[in-house]
Amino acid sequence: MSAELKGFVLVAIVKILVVFTAILVGVMMVIWAERRVSAWLQDRLGPNRVGPEGLFQSLADGVKNIMKEETQPARGADRTLFYLAPMISFVPALLTFCVIPFAAPLPGFDITLPVLGRFAYPGAIPMVVADLPIGFLFILAISSLGVYGIVLAGWSSGNKYALLGGVRSSAQMVSYEIALGLSTVSVLLVAGNVTLSDVIALQQQSVWFVFALTLGFVLFLISAFAETNRLPFDLPEAEAELVTGYHTEYSSMKWSMFIMAEYSAMMTMSGLIATFFFGGWDVPFITWDEGAPSVARTLVTFAAFFLKMNAFLFGYIWVRWTVPRFRFDQLMQLGWKVMIPIALGYIVVIAVVVYTLGALGWEIGPRYGLVLFGVNAVLMAAVLWGLDRGRLLMGSRQRARMAA
């Protein structure tokens, strides 16, 4: 085996171990953060007994679930699918993060280890597990598999409440997956590329897409809440109606895997929002992070990506403990009658603007981003005006007219 091949394998193994370990540890930290933030919002203490500030509470819960007795449906269940469903739900959430760049590249190396021999990695080391040229398409393909785990969990349990939760989930996730995909088409139209590293580079050259594609960001954010089954879109596990929904019959570590899948999906969606619309690992207002690869640049850009991702995780938690749950008919009406038509119209408008600017010979840059910002400001004003007048959603005025 050549030194270059050995270096490539070593880098791949290290990145896989580091990223997957970080996700699993991050899930525990996000669960702890949700408990602490919800306690802060509700003016109570939250977990504060196990470890400093209750930091080890999630670890204690994990140990409890490992030691807890397994329960199985007594009858009417498909045992094979019942055991496979948690894994089918959990694995896509982990795989999706593999194509998200989380820092600036590291410099290559050429070292010799005792017994193992020489390891070499020529060129910069990309800080992403798999720098796929079809990274965005990979995300859409893999993330769509998560719904199978939830649907199969409901169907294989032989429980009507679980089945209803699974059916709700399939309808919800398929509906908002369409809006999610359409909302990112605008990013692809402007970037002209489906590689996430190139999307970040283009935002470094012009402006973050949250300014250039504001309406696309809003659509993506709402769809991300629905895709991860978080309030106000947690209809698949509405405890007031379905006991706990699709995982009613699950306990111990099988139940924990569904919770881990939900929080892993939250982390992945937060990373995607940061990458698509907030420059990924780009540090704002400076160009130092765009220089030659170095350890210092990698650490600083990783810190920037970490802060952006955690800001959106805080948003997930904040919304959960602030906004009430939608009714299912409101959920579907928002998805099919509002999100998808707006996303389709938005694609047409952005395509026309991009084509026009290209015909004028404009390159990606601050001036290009300023024009897109103006277009999005007009579109946001039009959408908010239309929604506020009760024309698309059933607002107070429309209900008053119907009552009269």
Image (cartoon, grey):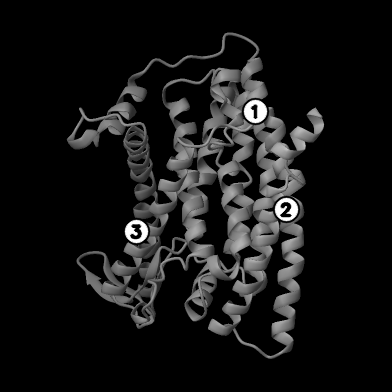
Where does the image place residue 133, in percent across and percent down from the top left? 58, 69
Query: Can residue 158 be seen in the rendering of this structure?
Result: no
Instruction: Please give the residue where the numbered disc 2 appears in the rendered image.
Output: 386
Which comes before the other along the chain, label 3 or label 1?
3
Binning the other alpha carbons within 10 Å of mark 3 as few (below 14), some (14 to 19) or many (20 upward) gives few
Q: CA distance from mark 2 to mark 3?
A: 51 Å
Instruction: Please give the residue where the numbered disc 3 appears in the rendered image.
Output: 14
Mark 3: amino acid:
Val
Count of marks placed on residues: 3
The quarter of the picture where residue 352 lies is bottom right
Mark 1: amino acid:
Gly
Q: Is residue 390 above or below residue 129?
A: above
Mark 2: amino acid:
Gly
Where does the image place residue 212, in percent across and percent down from the top left? 58, 71
Q: Nearer the viewer, mark 1 or mark 2?
A: 2
Task: Tell me the quadrant of the picture where the N terminus can be found.
Answer: bottom left
Dot label at residue 166? 1
Q: Nearer the viewer, mark 3 or mark 1?
A: 1
Where does the image place residue 381, in percent across and percent down from the top left? 66, 61
Q: Is residue 176 above or below residue 243?
A: below
The quarter of the picture where residue 216 lies is bottom right
Which comes before the other along the chain, label 1 or label 2?
1
Residue nearest the observer in this picture, 315 or 95: 315
Q: Is residue 81 left or right of residue 111?
A: right
Identified at 31% across, 74% down, the residue is: 297
Mark 1 residue element? helix
Q: CA distance from mark 1 to mark 2?
A: 33 Å
